[in-house]
Image (cartoon, helix red, strand yellow):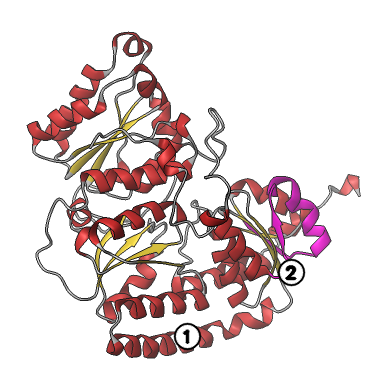
């Protein structure tokens, strides 16, 4: 099998729920149209949480600057944490003319000798893809020389956006790592988490519950993941996609090749967390496990409701606007509703068709699905009488101008909002934002303007 990936194959995904309703496959990428992140960034975001692997960007140093440390992906890896190190060949004009292959060979040799990672991911970028550097041959020789996986990642920025880059990253793991090692032992309750990147520790909010139930996490793609564990992922009993629809291709191919069924779940909010835990138990098909899961859900929901009582009065009658991306357009909306907050609008500009349907179902007939949130959110704050804006950092200024509370819920957030404990964190942050006077004070007119 050739290492090169055919982009067209990723634009027609049979496992997409809406695929049969379309007359044509997903829209082809438009060269240069990478607003919101390019394919290279998407691939690196998907693979970067493997803290035991070195991530070498074969391209200009600016590519590293654009993507490195954009998400706080936490890890429990006890060795050298390569998420804290950026490696690049720093391709120059001279390399464009005479090839950057020799520089890449030296970079791989230095990383292997000085840092001894479990694997090395080598990322193609726009420049090195255009000049035709042969990543496949170089990585193949390096892998034989240094006896560790050296993996070419063909996701140059110009092929499309972050979503496509995530799919290409998943395909890379399938071709080069999954199925290359057998686990020491297997259990009837082994699962893989797919699309969970453990941003601010979200995964750690619910994996203790899975462990309590006896469900073993065999591998992840890729939060708190390990190279050795993803190599054994083909022996899992179930794949669980955590919100990331871009990786449906990965799970479909895992099912076709290894017979592993898959389900898609969200761990944001009380309702979705409970539904996810029960769905995993039901998919594993053990009656005792299902009954124990129901008892655990009952216990955790009771604890959560007791902890949320002080917040209910403050949140009564409050309205929120949500401006974030992809699956969070509905998953965080569900969490807000669990707190008793009405979500009057959510952004769907970067959402899939399935995400839009879910957002519509959660918000109801009166909810607004914003296609261009940058232009729509300010008027909607006044029209809907919103008290709270949840978005990325750039929307803070909209909240200040409109004198309403603001919370950053994108990847730059500082605390986890995953599962039951994360919902309590979200409630506390909303309470602090609503009671913080800075949002009304900063937006006031100066005394001489009144």
Magenta region: 364-390
The residue positioned 28% from the left and 81% from the top of the image is 212
Quick check: 135 left or right of 244?
left
Question: Total number of numbered labels?
Answer: 2
Quick check: 189 left or right of 352?
left
Q: Where is residue 70 in the image (x, y as percent from the top left)?
A: 44, 44
The residue positioned 66% from the left and 49% from the top of the image is 395
Residue tagged 1: 301
Whether 387 is among the magenta residues is yes
For the N terminus, which image quadrant?
top left
- Evaluate whether residue 69 shows in this view: no
- Residue 70's place in the image compared with 440, above or below, is above
Q: Where is residue 201 in the image (x, y as percent from the top left)?
A: 38, 62
The residue positioned 38% from the left and 55% from the top of the image is 197
Whether 194 is among the magenta residues is no
Q: How crowded is mark 2: few (under 14 residues within 10 Å), some or many (20 or more)?
A: few
The answer to whether marks 1 and 2 mark residues whose Cβ atoms lie closer than 8 Å is no
The residue positioned 77% from the left and 54% from the top of the image is 402
Residue tagged 2: 365
Q: Of label 1 and label 2, which has the lower sequence position?
A: 1
Mark 2: which secondary structure? loop
- Residue 427's place in the image compared with 63, above or below, is below
Mark 1: which secondary structure? helix
Q: Position of residue 265 (x, y in %)?
A: 44, 68
Quote the CA–CA distance across marks 1 and 2. Answer: 28 Å
Q: Which of 182 and 99 is in front in this view?
A: 182
| Mark 1 or 2, closer to the camera | 2
């Amino acid at each position: 099998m050739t290492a090169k990936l055919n982009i067209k194959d990723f634009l027609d995904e049979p496992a997409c729920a809406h695929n049969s309703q379309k007359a044509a496959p997903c829209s082809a990428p438009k060269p240069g149209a990478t607003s919101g992140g390019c394919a290279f960034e998407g691939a690196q975001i998907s693979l970067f949480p493997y803290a035991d692997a070195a991530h070498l960007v074969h391209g200009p140093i600016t590519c590293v600057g654009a993507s490195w440390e954009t998400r706080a992906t936490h890890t429990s890896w006890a060795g050298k944490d390569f998420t804290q190190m950026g490696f690049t060949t720093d391709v120059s004009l001279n390399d464009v003319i005479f090839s950057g292959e020799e520089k890449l060979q030296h970079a791989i040799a230095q990383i292997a000798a000085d840092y001894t990672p479990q694997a090395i991911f080598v990322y193609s970028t726009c420049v090195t893809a255009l000049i035709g550097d042969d990543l496949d041959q170089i990585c193949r020789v390096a892998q034989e020389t240094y006896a560790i996986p050296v993996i070419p990642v063909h996701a140059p920025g110009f092929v499309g956006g972050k979503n496509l880059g995530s799919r290409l990253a998943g395909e890379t793991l399938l071709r080069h790592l999954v199925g290359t090692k057998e686990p020491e032992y297997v259990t009837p309750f082994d699962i893989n988490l797919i699309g969970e990147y453990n941003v601010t520790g979200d995964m750690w909010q619910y994996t203790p519950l899975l462990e309590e139930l006896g469900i073993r996490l065999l591998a992840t793609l890729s939060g708190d993941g390990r190279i050795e564990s993803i190599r054994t992922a083909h022996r899992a009993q179930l794949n669980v996609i955590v919100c990331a629809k871009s990786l449906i291709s990965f799970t479909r191919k895992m099912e076709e090749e290894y017979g592993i069924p898959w389900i898609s779940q969200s761990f944001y909010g009380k309702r979705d967390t409970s539904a996810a835990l029960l769905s995993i138990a039901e998919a594993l098909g053990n009656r005792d496990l299902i009954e124990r899961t129901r008892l655990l859900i009952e216990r955790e929901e009771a604890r959560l409701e007791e902890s949320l009582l002080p917040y209910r009065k403050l949140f009564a009658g409050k309205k929120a606007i949500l401006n974030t991306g992809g699956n969070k357009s509905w998953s965080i909306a569900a969490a807000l509703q669990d707190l008793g907050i009405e979500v009057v609008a959510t952004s769907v500009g970067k959402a899939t068709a399935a995400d839009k349907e879910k957002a519509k179902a959660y918000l109801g007939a009166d909810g607004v699905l914003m296609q261009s949130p940058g232009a729509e959110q300010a008027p909607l704050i006044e029209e809907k009488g919103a008290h709270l804006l949840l978005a990325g950092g750039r929307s803070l200024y909209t909240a200040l101008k409109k004198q309403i509370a603001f919370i950053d819920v994108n990847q730059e957030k500082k605390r986890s909002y995953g599962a039951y404990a994360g919902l309590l964190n979200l409630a506390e942050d909303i309470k602090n934002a609503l009671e913080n006077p800075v949002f009304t004070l900063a937006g006031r007119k100066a005394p001489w303007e009144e």
